[in-house]
Structure formats: C-alpha cells, structure tokens
Image (tube, grey):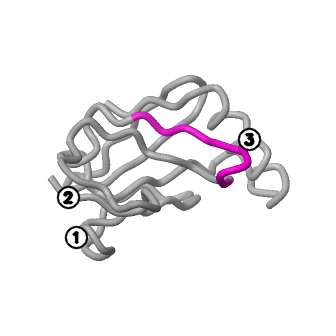
C-alpha cells in the first residue's frame, strides 16, 4: 500500500534517534483538507494506534495511517531528497491528478 525508499528509511531512523523516541514510535502518514491543490500530506511520529488505523510494515519502517487516508495514499512511495533543489520527504502518489509546485498538496 505505502512503500518507503531506502533514503526515507534512513532519514526516519535518524530522526527517531535524534528525538530520543522509544521503539514503540512509528511513522503516522495522513491526508487532510488544505493546501493549494485541495489536500495536504501529514507526516508525524506517534505511539498510539487508533481504532480503524491501517498498519503497514515496509522496508523496516512501521507506517500507520487512518482509514480515510488509505484511499488517497494507496500505491504511494515515500522518499527523501537531500539535493540542491531542496531537502525533505516527498510523496510519489499515483492517485494524484494534480500537485502543487512544492509537492506538499495534491488533488485526485
């Protein structure tokens, strides 16, 4: 459902270590209304699985998303870029019909 590249996995591991999170923390990925294209990605660390959450383990990363967001994120690849044009997590979402220039919002 959601895949995590090696670069994203490495950066997630670094962030967890830098923040001194314990092993029960995971990456929560979601979609919320907003942004210039209508929907925005939400990315955070969490340690509480809520009722209805989907849990995905990919490439050694535990990713949790709410049931509504799964519909928008199915088939999405989470990557991390650290090039000259910017640094940060990127979402390669095959469901997005339009994205904004910054890549933080999309529409379907």
**45 sits to left or right of 58:** right
SS category of the residue bearing label 2? strand
Q: Earlier in the sequence, mark 3 or mark 2?
A: 3
Q: Earlier in the sequence, mark 1 or mark 2?
A: 1
Numbered badge on residue 5 = none
Separation of marks 1 and 2 at Cα, in angstroms: 6 Å
Q: Above or below — where is 61 with respect to 53?
A: above
Front position among marks 3 and 2: 2
Residue at x 44%, y 29% (from the top left corner): 3
**According to the image, label 3 marks what residue?**
13
SS category of the residue bearing label 3? helix
Q: Above or below — where is 96 with respect to 46?
A: above
Residue at x 18%, y 48% (from the top left corner): 97
**Main secondary structure found in the magenta portion:** strand
Question: Do the numbered discs 1 and 2 sit on residues whose CB atoms are within 8 Å?
Answer: yes
The location of residue 55, given as percent across then percent down, is 38, 39
**100 sits to left or right of 18:** left
Indicate the quadrant where residue 68 lies.
Answer: bottom left
On the rendered image, what quadrant is the N terminus found in? top left
Magenta residues span 77-86
Q: Above or below — where is 68 with respect to 95?
A: below
**According to the image, label 2 marks what residue?**
107
In-front residue for pair 95/59? 95
Q: Earlier in the sequence, mark 1 or mark 3?
A: 3
Residue at x 63%, y 48% (from the top left corner): 24
**According to the image, label 1 marks what residue?**
38
The location of residue 63, given as percent across then percent down, is 47, 42
Separation of marks 3 and 2 at Cα, in angstroms: 30 Å
């Amino acid at each position: 459902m959601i895949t995590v590249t090696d670069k994203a996995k490495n950066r997630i591991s670094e962030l967890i270590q830098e923040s001194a999170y314990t092993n029960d923390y995971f990456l929560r990925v979601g979609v919320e209304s907003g942004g210039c294209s209508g929907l925005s990605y939400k990315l955070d660390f969490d340690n509480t699985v809520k009722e209805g959450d989907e849990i995905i383990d990919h490439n050694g990363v535990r990713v949790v998303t709410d049931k509504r967001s799964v519909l928008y994120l199915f088939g999405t690849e989470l990557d991390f870029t650290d090039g000259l044009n910017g640094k940060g997590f990127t979402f390669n979402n095959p469901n997005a019909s339009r994205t904004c220039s910054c890549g933080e919002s999309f529409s379907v």
